[in-house]
Image (cartoon, grey):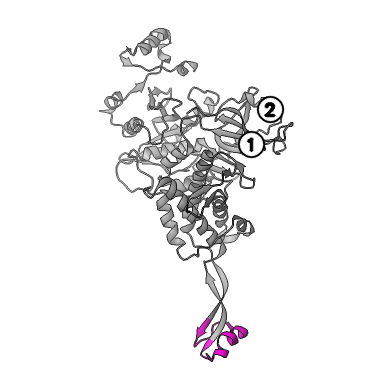
Amino acid sequence: MKKLEGWQENGKQCLFYYALDNSDIHNLKEKVDVANIFMPNNGETVNLGLHRYKDNVFTSNYVGICRLKDSARNNIKIDESGKEVILRVEPRFPLSIVKLLNYIKNDDEFDRYLAPQTTRYNESEKDIESLSKNEIFHFFEDEPPIKVEEGFAMESSIITISVFLTMLKNLCKKPLKGRMIKKEENLVGKVKGKIVFHQNIKNNTIRGRDDRFYCQYLKYSEDIIENQILKAALLKAKRFVTEYFGEDNGGKNSFVEMIVFCNKSFAHISKVKVSSNECDKLKFSGCYSYYKPVIKAGKMVLDEISIESSGKVQLSNYVIPYAISMEKLFEIYVRSYLKQNGFLSYKEQADSGIQLGKFDEKLKVFAENNGPLVGKYIAGNIKPDIILKNLDTGRLTVFDVKYKKYGNTQYVRNDRLQLLAYSMMYDTSDIGIIFPMEVEEKNRIFESQKINTYQSRDVKYHQIQLAINEEGCANDVAEYINNIVMKDEDNYSDKLNSLSITKNPEPYKDSVKTYLKASENGDSYLGKDVTFDSDLLDE
């Protein structure tokens, strides 16, 4: 199904502009003065990261929906009609966010993917501080919701529920908030707290029950409004998941597993009817500050989903504006792909095999810190996306994940220096970049290239394009990476030759016509079966 692009009418109050991520949106200027659009810096999510390049406006790695802001960060409106301009960006791949999310949510690090990344070496892991400080999903929680069509509303609700259940499960691993509440009770043969005399006379004295005392006392309880709101949102989420996904949704971080886990923690909390407006009255500080983002996510669930008297789930078709980082989502997809193809998580204890380094793992540039007068211009940390360790030999292999076209050389210098730094600091002979496959459903593995170096060891660069689909792509990339990491010098070449590796046409520039002809006819060239992509010549 072809995705919408360009201007679309949507009701009396809004005008929608549809676009794909990392795309030129030159026809935005048909109705909007692009010179007045706010262009964020440093990865900000305002306007979903729109930016200028060579006098053209491009979308970024963010997808989602938002109101378009001007340079003063006010909502842009069309002069003649006063309609708000809604920017909606979708992935450029033929895959929905929901299907991608469904693939990665069983990852054992999924809850850490949602938390803010640390920036300092040995810094303790952070909890999710707010819905606007999320590594993948950024919700513009202070903005009013936007009316959308039913299909998009359901996709948005699935995303909201995924975030809510993940955060709620993490909250349930900590003490639930409680407070001292007043409780009145007619006790037999004892006094607790103080006697409420007018109630004692009414209920006991005039009835001749002098053995009873009507008392009021303080009692610590977790059955408070904060937890009642979360339970109400949890029950709505459970009803939604059951209707749209069924009961059979297994897996470590499946919706059903998370709901069962949370239900046990909230079993003693009363089921009460609550309004999302009650969330606005609550304040959190101190040791229970971790409640704040979960309550806000719960409010979004209460607003977006309603249950009819018949028990049927009804969506409001209003969604909170949000941005999703496809760059982070693709990195997590790669990590999940490797784990689902036999690579060990850092949490697993093993003496043999290939282990994936911890997400957000860092290495200090300097080995020692000797005081303020020492040269520190390049001080800091490096943080590769994928670190693979051969547990048998201790050998490391490092990959970086780039959500971009492999032929886009705009930032190639930064990427080049980044990889070469990884090779030096991690003492690895194999480095590489994993790109997403643009159109085709099959993976592409490029022929490795030897890097010029004065070091005594050989260093090779590996380039891979990984397909994105809901079932998970073929395991040939995982097999290729496995052969690199578990390098056995006797069988290494034979193992790589057994895989389908795309030859780089650059060595054959003098025979491009022959190469093209061989590709067109499906023949072999220089003893190798070849596939051709015109983008290869763009480099």
Horizontal and vertical percent position of residue 399: 43, 33
**For the residue labelled by badge 1, is the local secondary structure a helix, a strand or a loop?**
loop
- Magenta span includes 200: yes
Q: Which dot marks residue 366?
A: none
Q: Which residue lies furthest to the left in this view?
A: 490
Horizontal and vertical percent position of residue 187: 51, 83
Horizontal and vertical percent position of residue 350: 31, 46
Q: Is residue 14 something one can see in this rendering?
A: yes
Looking at the image, tell me whether mark 2 or mark 1 is earlier in sequence order. Answer: 1
> What span is colored magenta in the figure?
186-212
**For the residue labelled by badge 2, is the local secondary structure a helix, a strand or a loop?**
loop
Please give the residue where the numbered disc 1 appears in the rendered image: 11
Q: Is residue 218 above or below residue 77?
A: below
Give the class, few, some or many, for how many residues have Cα within 10 Å of label 1's Cα (few <14, many ≥20): few
Horizontal and vertical percent position of residue 487: 31, 32
Residue 404 falls left or right of residue 75: left
Residue occupying the point 60% across, 83% down: 199
Quadrant of the image occupied by residue 200: bottom right
Residue 33 falls left or right of residue 427: right
Which is closer to the viewer, label 2 or label 1?
1
Q: Which dot marks residue 31?
A: 2
Residue type pointed to by label 2: Lys
Quadrant of the image occupied by residue 202: bottom right
- Magenta span includes 491: no
Residue occupying the point 31% across, 34% down: 486
Residue type pointed to by label 1: Gly
